[in-house]
Image (cartoon, grey):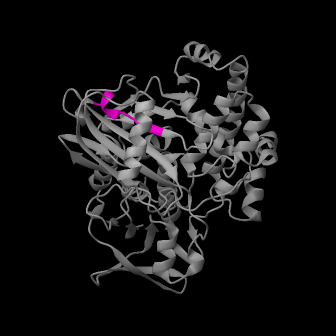
Amino acid sequence: MSGVLVIGGGFAGLVAAAALAARGCRVRVLEAAAEVGGKAHAIEAAGARVDLGPTILADLEPLRALFAAAGVALENAVSLTRLDPGLVATFPGDKRLVLHADPAAMADHLAELGPAARDDWRRIGELGARAARLAAHFYANGDVAGPRDFLRFVLGGGVRLDDVATFARHGSLARLLEAHVRTPELRRLLGHCARFLGLDADRAPAVTLVIPHLFATAGIWYPRGGMAALARAVRDLAVKHGAEVETGAPVARLEVADGRFLAAVTRDGRRIAAEACVAAVDPDSTGRWLAMPEASVPSEPAYAARVAWWVVEGMPRRPIHHAFHFDAEDAHPLYVAVPSLTDPTLAPSGVSVLYALLHGRPGVAAGPAFAEEVRARLVRAVSWPTGRVLAHGVAGGGASCYGAAIGPGLFAGFRPSQHVPGVANLVRAGGGVFPGPGLANVTRSGLRAAELVAPGART
């Protein structure tokens, strides 16, 4: 098959383009921005490079699959570091949990949270393995968008009925944790993993437990150069196999006739025809371009992520690459990354890059007051360096970076379909139609989009 148009040069679009090009398809990517990467973008400031989007990887399997399909080992294309400790969580009362790769060290840290913590963690490990089986079954069996898909999912083998029953019975992540975790600090930490979907724990499906399961078993990884560098590596893979990538090319509308995609029309009036199209943008944009509301996935937005960053002389008194700081019960936990601790290419010697993120309702962009609030919390958490600030800024908050909010229930996270209703050769990709833990599931959405538009193409 030839002639596939990919709209959107974020991770999902770049992955779809690389997978299609590696299959022998002729691929063209249109990206509205001046650079590819989408949410995985970085800026230069005071001689340092600061990622403003995602900062870690928790599941390397879809990236391994992409690079392997293109004949390259992931580790030969990208330098990856497994963080150990993977993360440090701090709680009121000077309590901490350090997520170690070594089970014995992990057990010692759990004991500091109280007598029930080790048993709680073991129980969550067992439930997390069940969640992982359900998630893997979903990845292998495709969309669960209706009753027929549900029957195919449940009866298709590869998953046990008790796996389904456990997560169907509890519904939300909060209810699952209330039933199985007695340690308050663990409930807060595990419940916070719902924020990887832009949700509170009482809104997230119970199967969201797969996220901390991945943290504990597959590890937490950092790509040298940051996520923007990883996006460029995927772009280079696509280009190596013949894909054309055009930036600064916003789309105005899509042409469809007789239930088939025909062409995209750019804002400067160019008509770009293709045999099939992957719309790696938010579902509302696809619906707007088609003038078909049914092509959208209407819902309230998930949380927005507001980021404050600094380039500072020195390093924090507690130097940690990746941390969650929990304050009062009603406060959003503060996520902090100091990637320069792991990656010396990000900043000059003796200089730290700090990245701090808080979630909140979308609609209010981050500003100076937000930065001051975050800085005060960093000082309280002993995560503020001692030297002078060389550069700082804020980003995000105006819109959700997670797409539409989903709800509790076993299949809530599996509901959005990558198929566009009524258009046979147009499929969607991205976090808005494939919710899950960060870039891993965005990557999976691109891989599946390639398979949907070019099944059986040369590999």
Span colored in magenta:
335-343
Q: Residue at x 32, y 51 (%)?
A: 41
| Position in image of residue 417 (x %, y %) | 61, 64
Is 302 included in the stretch rendered in magenta?
Answer: no
| Position in image of residue 115 (x %, y %) | 72, 16
| Position in image of residue 65 (x %, y %) | 46, 43
Q: Quadrant of residue 165?
A: top right
- Seen from the viewer's position, the closer of residues 434 and 89 is 89
- Furthest-bottom residue in this view: 257
Image side of residue 385 versus residue 376, left or right: left
Q: Residue at x 42, y 44 (%)?
A: 373
Report the quarter where the N terminus lies.
bottom left
Q: Quadrant of residue 419?
A: bottom right
Instruction: Give above or below for 301 relative to 71.
Output: below
Q: Is any part of residue 158 visible from this angle?
A: no
Q: Residue at x 58, y 28 (%)?
A: 92
Instruction: Give above or below for 110 relative to 439.
Output: above
- Seen from the viewer's position, the closer of residues 101 and 173 is 173
- Seen from the viewer's position, the closer of residues 332 and 29 is 332
Is 342 included in the stretch rendered in magenta?
Answer: yes
| Position in image of residue 394 (x %, y %) | 34, 51
Q: Is any part of residue 63 visible from this angle?
A: yes
Q: Residue at x 51, y 77 (%)?
A: 287
Image side of residue 285 versus residue 343, left or right: right
Instruction: Give above or below for 182 relative to 283.
Output: above
